[in-house]
Amino acid sequence: MKITVFTCNQPRHIGLINGLSKIADTVYAIQECKTIFPGQVEDRYRKSPVMEEYFSHVLKAETELFGSVGFVRDNVRTISMKSGDLSKIEMPVLADALKSDYYIVFGASFIKGDLVKFLTENRAINIHIGVSPYYRGSSCNFWAAFDGNHEYVGATVHLLSSGMDSGDMLYHALPAVGEYDSFALGMQAVKTAQESVICMIADGKIDGYRPTAQDKSLEVRYSRNADFTDEIAEKYLNTLPTPRQIAESLNNRDMRKFVSPYVSG
């Protein structure tokens, strides 16, 4: 089996690549690269003391679940590029990676042109870290937590479409009820989503889901990267809920709001 994944270069993205490589003969990994030191290095997020503090918590939670940045496994072939370059790449450059059994998108930039047409025609799967249609756009789990809606911290596994996080949904992946801090909860959502996709591909169940259209009238917030400012990050850091409060929120989830929910064990 061959799997192609369009992703990024942080530990959580490398974790997905290596996880897929355990069930595939070959994984083609197209990685768009950003700094691995957000808040300390100017990149997608600005360099500032507040951002450095915020991302220190994110990186700690990520390292605990996914380890540090490292090498991929031997059966992985990679192409690396700057974030945002993906839709500018000529299709022949990706030729070897466009003959796979499954196509996964996780943490890549917005895909356009011939590539998105090819991927949608070949039932590519997008792992959206956020629970659509309630939270769409950028940093969705942050905004769900910021709004006090921890029950909406999770991920949506859906078919890729030409729109932003708007494809038909296969299922929602949700962290199990437990006492997490806010940063660990968000990273557990990522881990649960990855594990679910790997398991579903391995046993063939991913092909059996009936896609469900998103009801955009249920949207709570559509967020953009520019919305995440120093002021917002500082307010969040100063009002973090306790792990017990998070557990209570998760325990009160209305599971009827989720599509075929997959909950981590």
Image (tube, helix red, strand yellow):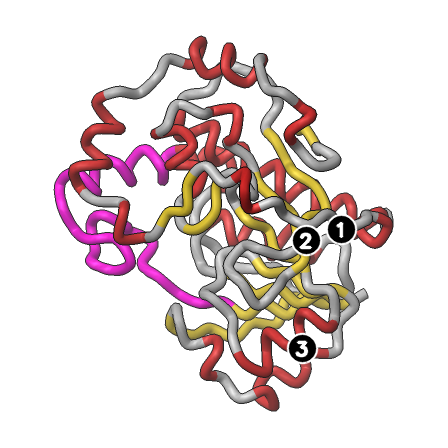
Element class at badge 3: helix
Residue type at mark 1: give it: Pro
Crowding around mark 2 (Cα neighbors within 10 Å: few <14, some 14 to 19, many 20+) is many
What is the three-letter code of the residue carrying label 3? Phe
Label 2, secondary structure: give it. loop
Residue at the image point whose x is 46% and y is 73% from the top: 80
Residue at figure coordinates x 54%, y 70% from the top left: 30
Q: Which residue is mark 1?
A: 211
Give the Cα separation between the discs numbered 1 and 3.
19 Å
How many neighbours does mark 3 have within 10 angstroms: few (below 14), some (14-19), or many (20 or more)?
few
Amino acid tagged 2: Asp
Cβ–Cβ under 8 Å for marks 1 and 3: no
Residue 209, how many percent across, how many down?
Answer: 81, 47
Most distant residue in the front direction: 217
Label 3: which residue?
118
Q: Do the residues under discs 1 and 2 have CB atoms within 8 angstroms?
A: yes
**N-terminal of the two: label 3 or label 2?**
3
Q: Which residue is mark 2?
A: 168
Q: Is residue 203 left or right of residue 119?
A: right
Percent position of residue 225, x then y? 32, 52
Q: Mark 3 or mark 1, which is nearer the start of the sequence?
A: 3
Q: Which residues are magenta?
A: 31-60
